[in-house]
Amino acid sequence: MPKPLSEQVVVVVGASSGIGRAAAVRFAAGGARVVCAARNARALDAVVAEIGDRAVAVPTDIADEQQVQALARAAEERFGRIDTWVNVAGVGVVGRVEDVPAEEFDRVMRVNYLGHVHGVQAALPALRRAGGGVVIGIASVEGVRSVPWQAPYAASKFALRALYDSLRVELAQSGDPISVVTVLPAAVDTPFFEHCRYHLGFQLQPPPPVYAPELVAEAVVTAATRPRREIPVGGATAVFHLGQRLFPALTDALLSVRGLATFLSRRGEPDNGVDNLEATPDDSGRVHGSYPGHVVRRSPFTTLASFVPRPGELLTAALTRLHGREDTAARR
């Protein structure tokens, strides 16, 4: 079982804004010591100032393997160990597949996918030294079903689900007491769409229903003490799951209706040319975006998914303990 939150040291990669920032604040409110990492040093300083002396800022580019390794060392040097590692950082490029340069596909995958690989590889030795813990990766409902204009982002999120599924089974086979959680948010009111690079001539906003980032942060914090295999955030994720599993061709047809995506997600503002694909914006970071409509702040569906274990999860946990005892006996 993971430690109580008040006894944990948590690393949050992507803590400068949005879900990551909300999660860092929520972890600290629960008594955890928090290592806040992201590229934007100014925003990290603002987060640490908000949290207080239970937090430390470590500017890190998750796409740089050496920086992520240095982050893990800094966390252990500062607080003695790591109990939970949260990979949140991500970037987006929006446009038709034929209009997005190959180097921008590459950049999205380097940050959104390889960045998580770097995080996992840095975290695992530290978690073993701590006697176990939790790895939490923020994927997306777009890792279940892709949508028009977001192929780079959706591809990276599909890749993340594959990464964490493989890791989860490998750790169970080796008997490591390390849980792996994949969080799948629906549309969330964060600055993400304002930070995307666009090849459409106009900006997008999250399509409704739109959920509060605090709702995702709460699921992340809960997972640090009650890990679940996957946590969908927002009832809209159930629609994506069912549509893709039962009616994938019909879903294709619905998404092919000309103008539907534009109607649901266009901001009505021209692209301002500002994005965080290569460099961070010069700001102090924000949790919330500028979505003008209703934002959903409670989700019984998410609460149920966060707290109720599935039978397969219980079986996997039992096998992990069995393999761990077998390895301990063999070493003796």
Image (spheres, helix red, strand yellow):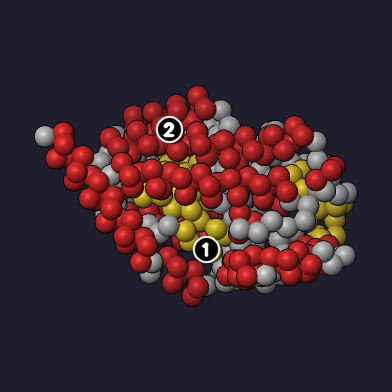
Determine whether the residue tagged by mark 2 lies in a helix, strand or loop. helix
In the foreground, 219 or 106 = 106
The local crowd at label 1, few if under 14, some if 14 to 19, many if 20 or more residues have their Cα within 10 Å, is many
Residue at mark 2:
122
* Contact, mark 2 vs mark 1 (Cβ under 8 Å): no
Under mark 2, the amino acid is: Ala
In the foreground, 65 or 3 = 65
Which labelled disc corresponds to residue 281? none
In the foreground, 127 or 286 = 127
The local crowd at label 2, few if under 14, some if 14 to 19, many if 20 or more residues have their Cα within 10 Å, is many
Q: Quadrant of the C terminus?
A: top left
- Residue at 64 percent of width and 56 percent of height: 142
Does 25 sit left or right of 272 as displayed? left
Q: Is residue 67 above or below residue 304?
A: above
Under mark 1, the amino acid is: Pro
Whether residue 199 appears in this view of the structure is yes
Determine whether the residue tagged by mark 1 lies in a helix, strand or loop. strand
Q: In x, y percent, where is residue 23?
A: 48, 53
Q: In x, y percent, where is residue 109?
A: 64, 38
In the foreground, 168 or 2 = 168
- Residue at 33 percent of width and 39 percent of height: 127
Q: Is residue 253 above or below residue 80?
A: below
Name of the residue lying farthest toward the top: 66
Whether residue 56 appears in this view of the structure is no
Q: How many marks?
A: 2
Name of the residue lying farthest toward the left: 332
Q: In x, y percent, where is residue 126?
A: 34, 34
Q: In x, y percent, where is residue 37?
A: 50, 38
- Residue at 69 percent of width and 56 percent of height: 146
- Residue at 45 percent of width and 56 percent of height: 220
Residue at mark 1:
232
Q: CA distance from mark 2 to mark 1?
A: 26 Å
